[in-house]
Image (cartoon, helix red, strand yellow):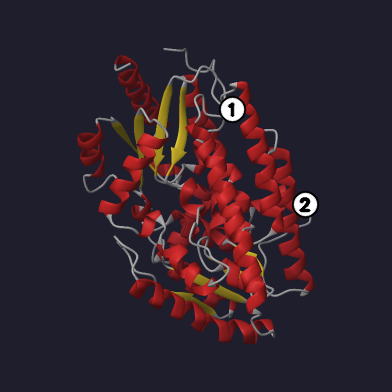
Amino acid sequence: MAEEGKTVRKKIQATDRMNKIMADYFYGLNEAATSKTQKVAWCTSVGPAELLRAMGFAVHFPENHAAMLGATRLSTDLIPAANAIGYSPDICSYLTADIGAYLNGTTPLAKAYPGIESVPRPDVLIYNTNQCRDVQDWFAWYAKELGVPVIGITSPKNVNEVTTAHIDDVARQMADLVPTLEEISGARLDMERLRETVALSRECTELWKRVLETATAAPAPLTFFDGTIHMGPAVVLRGTREAIDYYKVLLAELEQRIAAGVGAVEEERHRIYWDGMPVWGRLRQHSELFSGLRANVIASTYCSSWIFPSFDENDPLRSMAKAYLELFIVRSDAYKETYIQEMLQKFRIDGIIYHDAKTCPYNSNSRYGMPQRLEAATGIPSLVISGDLNDLRCVSDEQTKTNVEAFIEQLEEGK
């Protein structure tokens, strides 16, 4: 086995372009909020962003901000402020970190983007509970604190097959948002503009899927850790031309790597699937741990959460409803197991890492026997690592390192 630390993850050259695009996005949000030239909507990450963009809102995603709090390792010190006002340490650490940041008057945006002092003040908050109930509670707190309206969609959970009844329900709820949004924005919904926005989101999602599927090549030209960074435009800029233009550039670079036989991890020997959330405050450390063992974490359920094949500009509201119901996190365990088996085969996976995130049960799939069932069905071994998306008090670096090294050694012996 390669000595840990000698193998590194190759930098993606398009990163600088992405950083500029994200900076423009945040400065645009700040301008909208401070100059009052554009209404600001806060939206959950897989909420109806297309609807908001079509109605002229500048859109802020608190989950994206919370991930930045985690990646900059600020979150652990901020979470106790939210705990002190009654939010349990066991609930979503995105929620507690973000509210804690507000209570402490801090944001990583201020350091990353000089001139930005705070997250943009919202005119309205819109949630979709397709991920979890926490987003509703999160936005409800801000609605009361800031005195702004909160509206949203309550989605079903544990869906096996997405039915017409499911789509009808969510589409109706989505349509019911429109009158309130029209009142706040001061303009009627232009269905032609909504169709255009949904079409842009569809093109973005198709390109993002192609980006992730470059990892079917051996060696894979990107890693899961790259994906967690480069999914930024797919999260905050879907429905825009900027996201599409960026993914065309990124895809071209990755295709060039494939043609040249260049892998993201030198001398790639083991191909790993990651299920669950990343540990945001340990992205670099985990990337170096796996690459040092000549293991490439090449695919994940998480990064694929921004692939929405059902977007259809010819039926925008219903197709949005269907797309947001088809998310992996919404589905039943039976569906999830079939999906993961298909991914294992598609990406030629040698082993699976399940991240059991302390405060994110909806994105932790190791608690009800799934690893054991999938290993029995596929013969592919797995490892469960305990941790959290944002609260680093739940993370044991030494234990993670020891367990991953032992797991890769197990894969090596099976070669």
Per the image, the residue denoted by label 2 is 114
State the residue at coordinates (72%, 59%).
117
**Circle 1: element type:** helix
Q: Left or right of 176: which side holds 406?
A: left
Q: Nearer the viewer, residue 411 or 400?
A: 411
Q: CA distance from mark 2 to mark 1?
A: 38 Å
Residue type at the position of mark 2 = Pro
State the residue at coordinates (39%, 30%).
348
State the residue at coordinates (36%, 35%).
345
x, y percentage for residue 165?
Answer: 34, 75
x, y percentage for residue 1?
Answer: 41, 12
Name of the residue lying farthest toward the front:
314
379 over 167 or under it: above or below: above
State the residue at coordinates (31%, 62%).
161
12 over 311 or under it: above or below: above
Per the image, the residue denoted by label 1 is 258
Quadrant housing residue 263: top right
Quadrant occupied by the C terminus:
top left
Crowding near the residue tagged with mark 2, few <14, some 14–19, many ≥20 C-alpha atoms within 10 Å = few
Q: Left or right of 264: which side holds 274?
A: left
Q: Left or right of 401: which side holds 213?
A: right
